[in-house]
Image (spheres, helix red, strand yellow):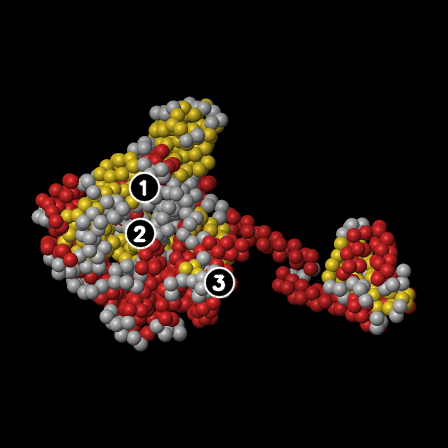
Amino acid sequence: MIVEELRNAFLAFFEARDHRRIPSASLVPYGDPSLLFTSAGMVQFKPYFLGLEAPPAARLTSVQKCFRATDIESVGDDSHLTFFEMLGNFSLGDYFKAEAIEAALGFLVGVLELDFERLWVTVYTDDDEAFELWRGQGVPAERILRYSAELGNYWYSGDTGPCGPCSELHYYFGDDPASEPRLPDGQIDLESPNFLEVWNLVFMAFDRAADGSLTPLPSQNIDTGVGLERLAWVQQDVRSVYETDQLRSILASAEAAAGIAYDPDGAPAEASALRTITEHARAAAFLIHDGVLPGNEGRGYVLRRVLRRAIYFGYTIGLRDPFIEGVIEAAIDASKSAHRGLDEQRAFIVRVAGDEERRFQAALTRGIELLDGVIEREAAAQRVPGREMFTLYDTHGLPPELTRELAAARCFEVSVAGFVGVRAAQRERSRGETGFSDYGGDEAERFAALGLDSAFLGYEALEAQSAVVALFADGERVDRLEAGAEGEVVLGATAFYAEAGGQVGDRGEIITGSGRFRVDDTQPLGGVHVHRGEVVEGALAEGEAAEARVDPVWRAGSRRNHTATHLLHAALREVLGQHVRQAGSLVAPDHLRFDYTHPQAPAAAELREAQRLVNAKIRDDIAQETFILPYEEAIDRGAIAFFEDRYTSEVRMVEYCEARVAPGAAHRHTPACFSRELCGGTHLHSTGGVGNFVITGDSSIGAGLRRIEALTGPEAERHIEERLELVDDLSQRFKAPPAEIAGRIDALEEQLADERRRAQAQSASRAAGVAEELADQAEHLNGVQLLVAVVEADSADALRGMADRLRERMDSAFVTLGAVIGDRPQLLALATDDVVERGLRADEVVKAAGAVVGGGGGGRPGRARGGGRDASRLGEALEAARALARERLGGA
Ligand code: SER
């Protein structure tokens, strides 16, 4: 079977066993800051395992895109991949060990017809139940090994969160198990290259806390994972993942670029480099598709490492010109049938990778030469010093991890501590994989414990009748909230929108028979809408009937800005290209902020074009339609899905397609949908209500990421009014109609420049006159002309000009001038070279004189400046300068 057939066979097998098929979530985990990337099929289901949210079904199956940064440096061998797809079946409190074991064998042996005799299994050390279940399926005891947690038979989803003992299926490629290496306890070592782990069955029954303690989960669950490429390796009976159909076609493109035929038995370095390029190009394509862009922090840094590693390994096999784009194209071709978005974003993905390659390649050759030099120089220490690592990183773009890897290949160590020290001293960069806080589930748990799914009635109404289900103050559940108390209210049903998808939570009030609660914010926590605010009248008590009333003005603003956000997104895609994707957004009642991917700053004309398009669609008054439908169907209909969203059940699709105004002379009919997005937010019934849209700013917020700020409705109108008022005001001040203001400013600037030139000429001729007079005042001291004087100057430049003129007139001289410029005493001293040689230095004199006026000074021996705060002592300061000069010239 080819990879695509395997994928479908797996999903079909579990669908036939009543599993709901769930689309892959993004590689960027949704709402889980504890994880950098989605690294397993269960990641998107974590809230279900923890009991925080109700799953769409008790049995799920998926093929999840995964990325494991921990495996980067192992890539190049036969089996390790940073990016792979994980086939999985999941039971949420439904079946447990017996059915999971039976199904795994049913698929591998029953459907794929793998040789049963080649399957070996592990069970957790004391898991007799699993042992007996495998025995019951006919696996002989000698092929069931008992592996401990240290040997990998206990699976944790992270430092905290769902976990459980596991049972793994391994495939044996060899001929004689008896000759395989053994562990100290006498059991066969499944790390031997003749074994390949294909399937991990996790009996997910515990939640690990930060202190390491385990508490049973609300139910016993199953989480299994099979690497699609590994399964293809076994099933296609080839020698590595790289010889399975999809990866082989990408490898072919790497071969073509390098002009080298892939030979797994030939030069190991060449084969490994080709495999690395293949894997990393594919991984990069998927990461960029999911919104990650090369950067110096977090996910962006990992992508940068992956791309640079590929480019470096290309370099080792002679690739000096850009090559990554071709391999990325091949990766997109290989994967596009199951991942249509890759093809849609092809140009953008290729460009991002190509830009990174050009940036890195330019510096790489020099970096490698530098590293070679260090390796030669440090032969005795066998260690790359931290400062060299930093230069390689900072100047040549070599990620420190790559330097470490290259050094290790030459039996060198690297000074990581030294590198960190130098980097910290220089600047705080590359925060790497840290900076991600713990999974913020604690708060959610408090509300999830209510076991409630509060009904949201706010799409249709702004008011809802219900009852107070729970009250909280300071995080503790209470029976009552008295007047003046701040707290949280949970209702059985509400009309308040809880913050999501960028749209802020609703405000308003909750009225009961005995009190009134002002709602300042609404948040979605643990499956319920949590209203936060303060009791402003009477008291609220649990169990009371309550009416939720959303502030209609607040909501109207949010709706207007949310609709405008969709229009803007669609307009940007039309004007800048289909690669544009939402990377974040804020929908507030009075403004909107839209973050999007685009490799460079859009031209002002492009932004204006997008703004015009949005306003045209507002005038078209396009009707909004909302559909609840399966995710695949929405995607088939062209809906845009955000990369951070998780689609586990039916989705809500908001579209703006047909103009409501009957097509007429002045109106262009829009047959296709202008905007179609998956969205849970609240929207206007038609675009006309947005009224008005203006972009007030566009700026860069990271490599390839930009942010637009915009206003709608009354705020847009106010903005335009303010601008117009400004123009009117300018028009009055310049006494010119608006169209002539710019010309008037140009003329004034020219006039100003003329005036400046004239003033400068005047001040130069004045300075020349003054210099003339001053030169005559110089005293002659042992062949040196000494001049110390207070002069009038209106700027430091004028003072300098005067001193320079004096110097031009004197052969051997020491000059100190003082002037009060803008209330401050300033000093300037000049000494000809021969005077400096005689021990009289301008900097020394200025320092001493500056001290007298409460300041100081400095510069070079031949020219120095100084100053202070006390202008009244300028004369005294100059006397001090004169005394010092006389003393040094031997005249005092
Ligand atoms: N979560 C487990 C793993 O990643 C099984 O899917 O191995």
Could you tell me residue 327's position as x and y percent? Answer: 32, 69
Callout 2: helix, strand or loop?
loop
Answer left or right for 858 relative to 214.
Answer: right
Q: Name the residue located 21 percent from the left edge and 57 percent from the top edge.
A: 192
Residue 347 appears in the picture as rendered:
no
Q: Which residue is mark 1?
A: 161
Q: Nearer the viewer, mark 2 or mark 3?
A: 3
Q: Name the residue located 84 percent from the left edge and 51 percent from the top edge.
A: 873
Answer left or right for 328 relative to 715.
Answer: left
| Rendered-image quadrant of the C terminus | bottom right
Could you tell me residue 86's position as x and y percent? Answer: 25, 54
Q: Could you say which is closer to the camera, residue 633 or residue 473?
A: 473
What is the three-letter code of the residue carrying label 3?
A: Glu
Residue 191 appears in the picture as rendered:
yes
Q: Label 2, label 3: how many angstroms apart (C-alpha)?
A: 34 Å
Answer left or right for 60 relative to 302.
Answer: left
Disc 3 under 8 Å from ligand 1? The reply is: no
Q: Name the residue located 23 percent from the left edge and 43 percent from the top edge.
A: 165
Q: Which residue is mark 3?
A: 388
Q: Label 1, label 2: how many angstroms apart (C-alpha)?
A: 14 Å
Q: Could you say which is closer to the camera, residue 1 or residue 567?
A: 1
Could you tell me residue 270's position as x and y percent? Answer: 31, 71
As displayed, is residue 704 above or below residue 99? below
Q: Where residue 39 is drawn, which disc sits there?
A: 2
Count of numbered labels shown in the rendering: 3
